[in-house]
Image: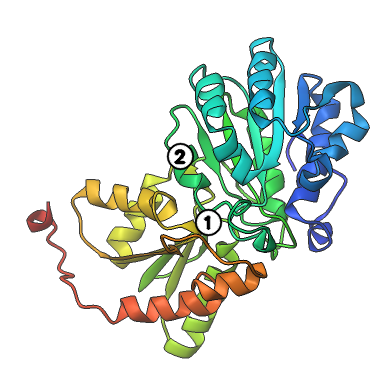
Amino acid sequence: MPESGLTWTVYDADKMTQREIYGAVLADLGDKHPEIVGLSADLAKSTKIGTFGDKFPDRFFNFGIAEQNMFAVAAGLAKAGLTPFVSTFSAFASMRACEFVRTDVCYQNLNVKIIATHGGTSFGSGGATHHATEDLSIVRAFPNMKLVVPADAIETAHAVIACMRTPGPVYVRIGRGFEPRVYEKTEYDFEIGRAVEMKPGRDITVIATGVTVFHAVQAAKILEADDKLSVRVINMHTIKPIDRDAIMKALTETRRIITVEDHNYIGGLGAAVAEVIAESGKGCAFQRVGIPDCFISHGYPEDLMNLYGIDTDGIVAKVRDVMGREFETDEDWEDEV
């Protein structure tokens, strides 16, 4: 891994959650970057920023259950030249502290890194108060904010390291439990704002983010074996700034696009991709797949993902549906502009 001096390997990703990898990476970065400070709102153990706090107790601050105060102080620390890493649940970072993230951090374009855990359906038993299925749409709207949703623990490590190379506010959204490993190697070309093509394809493109990337890859394998379909899979780990080039390449080469996200389909990845397509003036068969416009039920994350069709089975079914649609596929785009 670049510049981090990490001691863990790809095999540790099978035993460590995204949160645990994040805690380990941040503690390693703390050795090389004395300007890093850690902030928690009584969730150091749950978010794993406590790993950093144990190693650097003089650079770690617990604010209790006071998320708004925590982000206000993070802004002040950043103004003083430090690099605050702030950790709390995604629901709290995006909603309870919303105004402070927007006005104190983003308005001043401060170097605050937000590592938001328990995103999407990952805190299935937490109920509507703790589910975070609106956070991407909220945070994406803030000027100056960069928004990253890693696919697995390995990509989480890359995202945390990239935060140190990226000026200004960054929101990294990760899960709670043992998210499936997507990458087989720790070394690959990760860059904020540039998507990763996980699998080439010419018939249809599935653009996924976060935990749904694993399911998109698995669905593509099933569809290739059973339906003889060539399915392109894109890991859109950065939702803002979104990789417009990757979207347009998929649009012109496959003419069918599905987006999949562990988030309400309003305002998140699907909306961001749809904006790019609409502004291009070029048409395609397009479908957003995500949580519907509702508060989701309690349950195990895997059951919730299946219920709302954002797991492997759901993606397979949606690809088959979109492949059955008819639309104009001529090469003359002029009449569609």
**Residue 153 lies in quadrant:** bottom right
Q: Earlier in the sequence, mark 2 or mark 1?
A: 2
- What's the image's color scheme? rainbow
Residue 335 or residue 82, whichever sits in front? 82
Residue 18 or residue 323, whichever sits in front? 18
The N terminus lies in quadrant: top right
For this view, does 7 lie left or right of residue 330? right
Classed neighbour count for the residue bearing mark 1: other residues with Cα under 10 Å, few (<14), some (14–19), many (≥20): many
What residue sits 61% from the left and 56% below the top? 151
Residue 127 or residue 222, whichever sits in front? 127
Q: Is residue 193 above or below residue 75?
A: below
**Residue 131 lies in quadrant:** bottom right
What residue sits 60% from the left and 61% below the top? 121
**Residue 188 % position (x, y):** 64, 51
**Residue 253 % position (x, y):** 31, 63
For this view, does 138 lie left or right of residue 170? left
- Label 1 is placed on what type of residue? Thr
For this view, does 30 lie left or right of residue 320? right
For this view, does 16 lie left or right of residue 170? right
**Residue 60 % position (x, y):** 83, 26
| Circle nearer the viewer, 2 or 1 | 2
Q: Are marks 2 and 1 in contact (CB under 8 Å)?
A: no
**Residue 288 % position (x, y):** 38, 63
> Circle 2 — which element?
helix
Residue 180: assigned label: none
What residue sits 80% from the left and 32% below the top? 29
Residue 140: assigned label: 2
Residue position marked by numbered label 1 in the rendering: 209
- Label 2 is placed on what type of residue? Arg
What residue sits 41% from the left and 81% below the top? 229
Direction left: furthest residue: 335
